[in-house]
Image: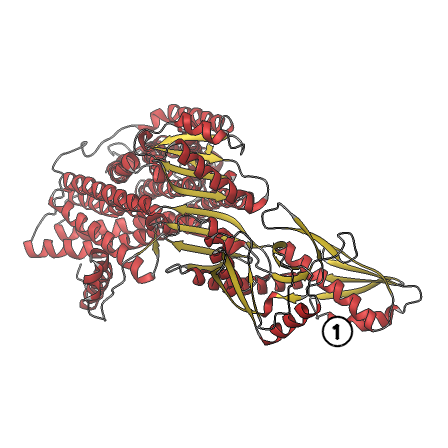
Amino acid sequence: MRTPRWRLVTYAVILLVGILAALPNLLSPRQLAALPSWLPAHPVTLGLDLKGGSHLVLEVDAAALVAERVGTLATDARAALREAGIAVRSAGTEGNTVVIDLGPGADGAAALSAIRPLLPPREIEAARPAPGRLVLTLTEAGVRERVDAAVAQSLEIVRRRIDQVGVAEPTIQRVGSDRILVQLPGVQDPSHLRELLGSTAKMGFHLLARSPSGPGVVVLPDRDGRATYPVERRVALDGDHLVDARAAFDPQTHEPIVTFRFDGPGSRRFADITRENVGRPFAIVLDGKVLSAPVIREPITGGSGRISGAFTVADTAVLSALLRAGALPAPLTVIEERTVGPDLGGDAIAMGVTTGLVGFALVFGFMVLLYGWWGMVANLALGLNVALTFGALGLLGATLTLPGIAGIILGIGLAVDANVLINERIREETRKGRGALSALGAGFDRAYATIVDSNLTALIATALLFQFGTGPVRGFAVTMALGIAISMFTAVSVVRIIMTEIVRRRRLKTLRIEPLVRLFPDGTAIRFMRARFLGIGLSLLLSAASVALFLHPGPNYGVDFRGGIQMEVATPGHADIGALRERLGALGLGEAALQAVDGGRGVLVRMERQPGGEAAQTRAVERMRDAIAEANPAASVVRTEVVGPKVSAELAESGVLAVVLASLAMLAYIWWRFEWPFAVGAIATLVLDVTKTVGFFALTGIDFNLTAIAALLTLIGYSVNDKVVVYDRMRENMRLYKAMPFRELIDLSINQTLGRSLYTSVTAFLAMLPMAVWGGGAVESFAVPMVFGILVAASSSVFIAAPILLFLGDWRNRRAAGRPAGFPIPATLPAGRHPSE
């Protein structure tokens, strides 16, 4: 039990660094500025759900990118063949191919040679399937390269556009192969943001055609869709020549306008166009819409001009920012949008701190009741765990989200699990007559393997949650993983040193860890397996009912999984849902589902996704906001979420996959650490636990969303954690009592671990209960099912997992027919012996 000095120094350094890294979270900005430069001075970064702001996911329109590339290729090929004197009958596009039919008598080989310079290797493949026909195909590699280049270019352009509007501390990063994540703190109304980021901003100057039906003419609408213009398809001057654009006011009419300026070549070309076409209308086209079509009165030689057209001040600010930042190579579609108001974020922080402190106090008091003054050592480790978790979040630059706060609070309950295991083991060793140091060493050593096994199962679920989760759910996974890893250090290493020093300094002969209030007697001998048929039968009945509820009426799927628009509305008093439903129903946007939240002081509004692309979603959100303001002028929209069908399908698929993979990972781990009957018993129980929890969602109507998936995965880890402790004691007893009937061995193991299972379940329950009661709708999908799931997992370890294991063991022993196997053969104990000996 002696600890080397180098190890003590290492532990001290870890604790010091962790506490210093956590300290900035308790200081004001002025105090942070006064800290020495060598000290950490960055508090934990708060997620948008805590500080307010907008979160958008943009996707590059690969189909439009391919269509543009193929169209350009067809035009360039026709021009190259014409310059080579080769007649072309037609040149059309079909998907990602260009089909060129040559004129009579044209030489196919010569035509192919003429367009060869237009065909980059690996990007374009050329073929001559028939005489007089050429087929040019954009390859898969070519598509990937185009999309990759477009995302890289779009990332920079999006960054420039956001810089133009002056948003502080934006987060702009690539996600996957074709998406861009944009997070903007403080931005609450993303309607202009959608326009700013979703507009391709491809500007061109076209002459108006004299006839709408002539060749090379296209009819384009204006930006409001109220008028159309016949425009020559050929671009007279490309917008790439723009070097500046500014919002301004017309000096005569005082209307908002946008002024622009060309570079040198653009200025000369603009002067030539205006000189040659005096008296003709000149259309300024942005993304296929005519902004204005002024008549050229005189040649414009200064290289500058202006755009007018009944703009608002906000319109000119957005348009000038778009033009200054440049055109996107392909359209960006807003496939996911989440907005949280700062007031809601502040309330979430206050709620998290309050419920966390209450949960900590409940766990603190419970540990003192359980172990007296020795419980204070566990509480010290618990406080260090929380401090080191915040320190690690700060050092890693991780973002703390609302589910992350839930993860820290749950971690408070789970962190004492190792201390409970250790203390219960020490008590057992003391009852066997061991001295203080001997009991202390044996208790830690025998608990160590169980602690590692139980925490690794939780880490498996957490890792999968991080892999398949997004945004705040990943924040939960990070905080949970840190909490679990740090709890193993504080509970095993720090507590061991503290307890050893106390024993040495007080020269204790016997280490007695006794509760202040005894919850149930030691040495229980309950015959749990007598109720095995009742336990499994009742569980199967409840799970069958849960599956039926899942199928009909089904869970209350959130916007994450079914797509659409969701708003959370806060009202100063009791919300009038009837009036709000009437206003929203009159919009003609489809059926609106309304649900009272936060004790009737708020309303959750869900609207189906609107047909017509992203512009339709923006219009719907604005109309819904107006209707809410008309129904209750004092109401405020504190949170908005818009999720497209593609994202919702991906989230649903990822959620199901994460749950399935977590279950399989548990199966493999337990099979590896124990044997296959243990693994099968654990997974069968896990399926029953999960189905009951899903049925709980369907029965209560709690939102089934990404946070619900986080709750399910956490319960999977917690449930297996609880069963691993019982399994580990069974494995130990199987080595000690080789001739004991398996039923008696299981009862013995459950009774020996009953205190630990009960105490850990109570601490996790107490930690989560305040959040479940006072957390509100933002964490309801996590906290309430977790409280329910903790109770289910605790009972299933005794009444389901153990009986299943008994059935499998008996079946395996019958098949073994007396041969040695992993399970003992049922037999009676020799006379005069008792299972506890």
Tell me the residue at 33%/38% (across/down): 783
Name the quadrant of the N terminus: bottom left
Judge by depth and name the residue closer to the eye, 490 or 52.
52
Relative to the observer, which residue lies in front, 170 or 383? 170
User: Nearest the camera: 259 or 173?
Assistant: 259
Residue visible at 89% across and 69% down in the picture: 107
Closer-to-camera residue (783/821): 783
Other-residue count near label 1 (Cα within 10 Å), few / some / many at <14 / 14–19 / ≥20: few
On screen, residue 782 versus residue 308, left or right, reads left
Residue 506: x %, y % from top left:
6, 53
SS at badge 1? helix
What residue is disc 1 on? 117
Q: Quadrant of residue 780?
A: top left
State whether residue 72 appears in this view.
Answer: yes
Residue found at the very far left of the displayed protein: 506
Extreme residue toward the right, this view = 105
Q: From the viewer's perspective, is 515 left or right of 829?
A: left
Relative to 516, say whether 504 is above or below: below
* Amino acid of disc 1: Pro
Q: Is residue 252 above or below residue 568?
A: below
Return the x and y of residue 36 as percentages of the image width and height. 20, 70
- Is residue 673 in view? no
Q: Residue 134 location in percent, x, y?
A: 82, 63
Q: Residue furthest bottom?
A: 264
Q: Residue at x 50, y 42 (%)?
A: 656
Q: Quadrant of the C terminus?
A: top left
Looking at the image, residue 260 sits to the left or right of residue 377; the answer is: right
